[in-house]
Amino acid sequence: MVDFDEVSTGAVWMDGGFIDWDDATTHVLSEVATFGAGVFEGIRTYPTEEGQAVFRLEDHLQRLENSAKLIGMDLEYSVEELSAAAREVLRRNDVNEFETSFYVRPSVGYGYHGIGNPEAAPVNTYIFTFPLGRLSGEDALTNGIEVMISPWRRLHSSQFPVQAKANGVYLMSLLSKQEAQRNGYDDALLLDMDGNLAEGADSNVFIVRDGVLYTPSLDSGILPGVTRRTLITLAQDHGYEVEKKTITTGELLTADEAFLCGTGVEVTPVTAVNTTTIGDGVRGPITEELQSLYLDLTAGEIDGYDGWLDHV
């Protein structure tokens, strides 16, 4: 986890200029604070032989632009402008002096202009960065985690624009993960409104059956994950069949392997769901191979994917 005392003097980009970390504030009655009326992205840098590199920066920022459009918010900066701003934030925070990953958090939200009137409120754009380790702990990538099926359901696209990475909907993620951890689990899985597998609390999910990878399709109400897309490409490039489909809980519980993926969790094996062991209860061989490929890729050690790494 992050010790924010260590980053509280960092530079933050806000609306075209730079401010100090402690000045990156918003009014408590702003639309983003009151209603969660904002969108955001989670992006990671990785140390490489050529210094820190941001993984799939423009893809994340394109999703940020799409998220803003889906909730009717005018994003005042282009993907190219935000990309340049993110790299400058990283440079100003001297990230190349560190041998650790950094988190890059673009955040766009309606500011303060009365209550319940977002159209009249200013739109504020921030970009933060701070060090980020393994979210589930250093051993999780090897030993895996145990997850609980959340009692809360992932919203349907008829209820909310679920393909937007919007602040407000992440209260459901928080509740799901808290419930799981109170019950002794590491993380949570959410089902869709029909009771089929959707995603993790803040990640996408894959299962493996008979050597084939399966992941819930977008019509399951999932967030279109950048890491999910990356792993689909990596798996297919290395000879694996990948199918995007409806996955029942029965298929999940009888899978040979399962793993979560995302900017935060990277590629984390799931060894048990509720009280049911997945496969042999250890990181499976296909999960291990894809995890190794992903980590090598983000470290700049695999050729052919150069466009996915933006060096600081």
Image (tube, grey):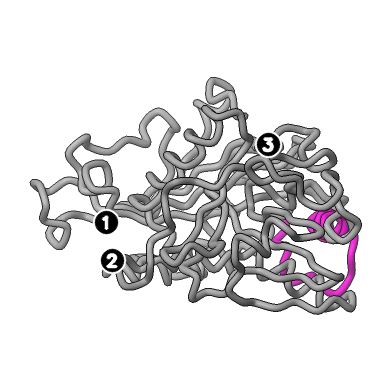
Q: Which mark is residue 136?
A: 3
The residues tagged by marks 2 and 3 sit, at their Cα atoms, a distance apart of 33 Å
Q: Quadrant of residue 98?
A: top right
Is residue 297 a member of the stretch shown in magenta?
A: yes
Please report the residue visible at 63 percent of the width from the left and 52 percent of the height from the top.
263
Q: Residues within 10 Å of mark 1 (few under 14, many from 20)?
A: many
The residue mark sitting in front, 1 or 2, is 2
Q: In the image, is residue 228 above or below residue 187?
A: below
Q: Foreground residue, 101 or 53? A: 101
Circle 3: residue type:
Ser
Contact (Cβ within 8 Å) of mark 1 with mark 2: yes
Secondary structure state at the residue bearing disc 1: strand
Circle 1: residue type:
Val
Q: Tell me residue 275's x, y (percent).
A: 67, 40
Q: Foreground residue, 86 or 247? A: 247
The residues tagged by marks 1 and 2 sit, at their Cα atoms, a distance apart of 8 Å
Specify whether residue 78 is in view.
yes
Residues drawn in magenta: 291-312
Circle 2: residue type:
Met
Please report the residue visible at 55 percent of the width from the left and 54 percent of the height from the top.
86
The residue mark sitting in front, 2 or 3, is 3
Q: Which mark is residue 73?
A: 2
Q: Residues within 10 Å of mark 2 (few under 14, many from 20)?
A: many
Extreme residue toward the top, this view: 5
On screen, residue 121 versus residue 244, left or right, reads: left
Q: Quadrant of residue 239?
A: bottom right
On screen, residue 115 versus residue 59, left or right, reads: left
Q: Which mark is residue 123?
A: 1
In the rendered structure, which disc, 1 or 3, sits on the residue that comes first in sequence? 1
